[in-house]
Image: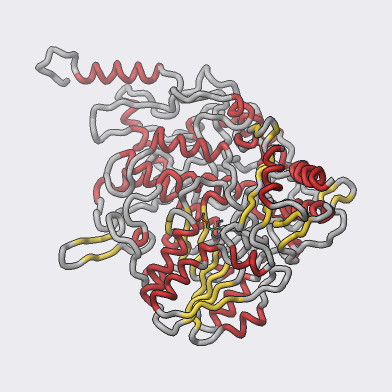
C-alpha cells in the first residue's frame, strides 16, 4: 500500500476512482488508467493478441489475466464502450456504403464497417451529411491499431540506429479479401460487430464484370483491351452504359463523398475536375481526424505510446502503398509531397549523381511540366541533352520515332502513363522495355493513372514510379516515389537532416537505407495515413471495376460531347482515360468554364501545366472535364446541356 506525505488518499484509491470515472463515460473505447508509467493494459493485451497469447475463447480479444485478477476491468471483454449508446448500425451508417459492398464479397469487412453509426467522440459534431453518408466517429481502416506493437517490441532492445518500424500489422498482412483486412483498430472489442456482419449479408451483392476480379487490383496488370474506345456510336444500348452491366452504382458511391452534396450557385455540384484533384471520401476525412485525436506524435524517435501509434499508422500506410502498386517491399516506397516533389527528388539525387555532360534524357511530348522542368534544369546544369518522343495528331506516342531516339547515350526515359491534358494512355510497358534494352533507367509519372487503372510496378518494370495522393482520393501534400530498392540504396540522399541518418559526427555521416534515406525531417505523417485510407477505399471498390466503369462513362461522354456543334475534342487517342479536353467554336475557354460554373459544374480551363502538348495540338488552352468513378451519366448530361444551351 502506498503512503504519501500530503494527506491525500493513497495512490491506489485515486487510481480506482479514476478508473471508475472513466469506465462510466460512455463514448470512448476502453480506457485504463494506471499510474505505473510502464503499464498500459490495452497495449499489452493487443500485443498479446499479436503473439497469440491470452485470447479468451468466444470473445476473440485478449485479456491480460493479471490485470483482471488484480480487480481491474478486463480491457476489452467486459466494458462495452458502446453499450446503451448505439443501435446496431444501419446499412447506410456503415460508412462503406452498400455500393462498396456490391463489389466486395460477403465475407469482406468493408472500409468503415464496424463503426458505431451513432457513436461520436466528445467534441465531434455530427452533421447531416455525416448521418446520410458515413459515420463521423471512429474512422474506418485505421492502420495503426493503437496497440502499438512497435512500442511494446522496442521497449527492451530499442536501437536508435535501426529503429524498428515495420511491424507486421494484422490489418494489412492478410491476403486481399480476407475478413478483417479493413478492420478497425478496436474492431474485436465492439460488441455489435456481429450485427454489422449480419447486415452486410443482407446487402445485395452484384456481380462484377465478367473476367474481372473485384478485389485484386493488381490481378489485371496489363491494361485490358476493353479500355480502347470502341466507337463513336451511341454508347447506351438497352439502357446499359456501353454494355457495362456490373451494377456499379456511382450514385451510392457519391454518397461517400460529403462535398458532392454541396450546392454551387444554387445547383448541386458536379465535380468534373478530377484530373486536377479528386474529392475525399468520408473514410479519409475520418481517418485524418482520428489520427489527430488519438495518434498524433512525431514518428520513430520516441519510445512512448503515441509515437508508436503514429509510427505504426505511418508504416502501415507505406505498406498499403506497396501493395497498391505491387512493389516488392515497403522499403521501395518513399513518402514525399506529391508527384512534382517525387520527380525533383529523382532528378536531384540520382540525376545529379549519375548523369554527366553528353548524356541524354528522353521525355514524351505529352508530359506535364512536372516531368519536363526538373529534367530541363538538370540538363542545363550538367550539359545533358533533352530529347522528345513525338505524338501523332490524335495525341498517341509514336513508338517508331521513339526507337530512333534511343541510343547508348540515353541514360533516362521519363514519361507519363496517362496524359493529364489529353487523356492518352501511353504504351508504358513497351516504352519501359525499349528504354531498358538501350540500357537506360525509366521513370513513369503515374499521377493520372493510379486513380483510373490497376498498376503493378513490377510488371511495368519501371525503375521509379511516382504519384500524388490527392489525385487518388487522398489528402493533398502527400505523394509517393516508388523506386527499386537496390537503386534507391545506390543513390545519395537529396535532402539532409534528421530521420535519414544512422550516425552523425562532424567528420562523417552515415545514412539510413531507403526509405528513411530519402525522408529527411518530419514528414507529412497524418496525410500519409490518410492516403492509406484512400487506398483502402479504392481497393475495396476494385481498380479493375473502376477502370471498366470509367471507360464506359468516357465513351458515353465522348459520344455526347462530339454531338455538340462546334466542339473540337483535343486528344482522340484510341486508348484514353478520364479526360475530355475540348474547345467550343465561338467561345473562349474561360467563357465556357464560367457558363458551366454558373450551373454548378466544375471543370478546368487553361493550359493544364502541359503547354508543349497543347501547342502541338494547335491550341494554347482547352476546357477539360475529367471523370472519376463517382461521376454519372447525369453529370455528363448536365455538362452537355450547358454546352448545347450556349451554342443554341
Ligand atoms: N504529372 C501529371 C501527369 C499530373 O497531372 C500532375 C498534376 N496535374 C503532376 C504530374 C504534378 O502533380 P502534383 O501537382 O500533385 O505534384
Asked if residue 96 lies left or right of residue 50, the reply is right
Identify the residue at horizontal 56%, vertical 33% (top origin). 114
Question: In the picture, residue 634 is in which quadrant?
Answer: top right
Q: Is residue 541 above or below residue 335?
A: above
Q: Nearer the viewer, residue 101 or 396?
A: 396
Q: Nearer the viewer, residue 6 or 443?
A: 443
Name the spot of residue 632 as percent of width and height, x first: 74, 44
Question: In the picture, residue 566 is in which quadrant?
Answer: bottom right
Asked if residue 291 lies left or right of residue 442, the reply is left
Question: In the picture, residue 308 is in which quadrant?
Answer: top left
Q: Is residue 209 visible?
A: no
Q: Nearer the viewer, residue 292 or 69?
A: 292
Q: Is residue 308 above or below residue 18?
A: below
Identify the residue at horizontal 63%, vertical 62% (top origin). 419
Identify the residue at horizontal 32%, vertical 29% (top origin). 67
Locate the N terminus and report the quarter of the image it occupies.
Answer: top left
Locate the C terminus and report the quarter of the image it occupies.
Answer: top right
Coloring applied to the structure: secondary structure
Name the spot of residue 300 as percent of width and height, x first: 31, 49
Ligand 1 image position (quadrant)? bottom right
Extreme-front residue of the structure: 586
Amino acid at each position: 500500500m502506498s503512503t504519501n506525505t500530503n494527506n491525500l488518499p493513497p495512490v491506489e484509491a485515486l487510481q480506482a476512482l479514476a478508473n471508475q470515472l472513466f469506465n462510466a463515460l460512455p463514448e470512448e473505447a476502453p480506457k485504463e488508467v494506471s499510474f505505473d508509467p510502464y503499464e498500459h493494459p490495452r497495449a499489452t493485451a493487443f500485443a498479446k493478441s499479436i503473439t497469440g497469447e491470452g485470447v479468451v475463447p468466444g470473445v476473440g480479444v485478449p485479456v491480460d489475466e493479471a490485470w483482471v485478477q488484480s480487480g481491474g476491468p478486463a480491457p476489452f471483454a467486459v466494458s462495452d464502450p458502446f453499450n446503451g449508446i448505439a443501435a446496431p448500425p444501419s446499412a447506410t451508417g456503415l460508412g462503406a456504403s452498400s455500393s462498396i459492398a456490391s463489389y466486395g464479397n460477403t465475407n469482406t469487412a468493408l472500409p468503415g464497417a464496424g463503426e458505431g453509426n451513432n457513436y461520436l467522440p466528445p467534441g465531434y459534431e455530427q452533421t447531416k451529411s455525416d448521418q446520410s453518408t458515413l459515420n463521423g466517429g471512429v474512422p474506418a481502416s485505421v492502420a495503426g491499431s493503437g496497440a502499438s506493437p512497435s512500442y511494446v517490441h522496442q521497449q527492451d532492445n530499442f536501437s536508435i540506429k535501426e529503429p524498428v518500424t515495420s511491424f507486421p500489422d494484422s490489418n494489412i498482412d492478410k491476403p486481399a479479401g480476407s475478413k478483417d483486412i479493413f478492420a478497425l483498430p478496436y474492431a474485436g472489442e465492439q460488441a455489435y460487430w456481429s450485427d454489422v456482419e449480419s447486415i452486410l449479408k443482407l446487402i445485395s451483392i452484384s456481380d462484377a464484370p465478367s473476367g474481372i476480379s473485384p478485389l485484386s487490383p493488381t490481378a489485371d496488370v496489363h491494361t485490358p483491351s476493353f479500355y480502347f474506345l470502341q466507337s463513336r456510336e451511341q454508347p447506351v444500348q438497352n439502357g446499359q452504359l456501353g454494355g457495362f452491366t456490373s451494377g456499379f452504382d456511382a450514385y451510392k458511391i457519391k454518397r461517400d463523398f460529403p462535398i458532392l452534396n454541396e450546392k454551387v450557385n444554387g445547383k448541386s455540384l458536379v465535380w468534373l475536375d478530377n484530373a486536377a484533384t479528386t474529392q475525399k471520401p468520408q473514410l479519409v476525412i475520418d481517418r485524418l481526424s482520428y489520427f489527430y485525436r488519438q495518434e498524433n506524435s512525431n514518428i520513430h524517435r520516441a519510445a512512448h505510446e503515441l509515437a508508436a501509434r503514429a509510427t505504426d499508422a505511418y508504416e502501415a500506410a507505406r505498406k498499403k502503398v506497396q501493395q497498391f502498386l505491387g512493389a516488392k517491399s515497403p522499403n521501395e516506397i518513399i513518402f514525399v509531397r506529391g508527384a512534382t516533389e517525387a520527380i525533383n527528388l529523382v532528378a536531384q539525387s540520382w540525376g545529379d549523381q549519375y548523369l554527366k555532360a553528353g548524356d541524354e534524357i528522353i521525355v514524351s511530348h505529352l508530359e506535364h511540366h512536372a516531368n519536363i522542368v526538373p529534367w530541363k534544369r538538370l540538363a542545363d546544369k550538367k550539359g545533358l541533352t533533352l530529347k522528345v518522343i513525338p505524338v501523332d495528331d490524335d495525341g498517341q506516342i509514336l513508338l517508331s520515332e521513339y526507337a530512333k531516339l534511343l541510343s547508348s547515350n540515353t541514360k533516362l526515359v521519363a514519361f507519363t502513363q496517362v496524359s493529364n491534358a489529353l487523356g492518352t494512355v501511353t504504351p508504358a510497358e513497351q516504352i519501359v522495355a525499349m528504354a531498358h534494352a538501350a540500357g537506360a533507367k525509366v521513370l513513369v509519372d503515374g499521377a493520372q493513372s493510379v486513380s483510373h487503372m490497376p498498376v503493378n510496378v513490377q510488371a511495368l518494370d519501371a525503375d521509379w514510379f511516382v504519384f500524388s495522393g490527392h489525385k487518388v482520393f487522398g489528402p493533398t501534400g502527400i505523394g509517393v516515389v516508388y523506386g527499386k530498392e537496390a537503386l534507391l540504396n545506390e543513390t545519395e540522399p537529396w535532402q539532409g537532416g534528421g530521420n535519414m541518418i544512422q550516425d552523425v559526427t562532424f567528420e562523417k555521416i552515415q545514412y539510413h537505407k531507403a526509405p528513411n534515406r530519402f525522408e529527411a525531417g518530419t514528414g507529412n505523417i497524418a496525410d500519409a495515413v490518410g492516403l492509406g485510407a484512400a487506398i483502402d477505399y479504392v481497393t475495396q471498390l476494385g481498380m479493375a471495376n473502376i477502370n471498366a466503369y470509367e471507360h464506359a462513362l468516357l465513351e458515353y461522354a465522348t459520344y455526347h460531347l462530339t454531338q455538340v456543334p462546334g466542339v473540337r475534342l483535343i486528344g482522340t487517342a484510341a486508348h484514353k482515360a478520364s479526360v475530355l479536353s475540348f474547345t467550343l467554336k465561338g467561345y473562349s475557354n474561360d467563357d465556357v468554364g464560367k457558363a458551366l460554373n454558373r450551373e454548378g459544374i466544375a471543370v478546368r480551363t487553361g493550359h493544364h501545366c502541359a503547354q508543349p502538348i497543347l501547342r502541338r495540338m494547335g491550341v494554347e488552352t482547352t476546357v477539360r472535364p475529367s471523370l472519376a468513378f463517382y461521376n454519372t451519366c447525369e453529370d455528363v448530361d448536365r455538362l452537355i446541356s450547358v454546352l448545347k444551351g450556349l451554342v443554341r
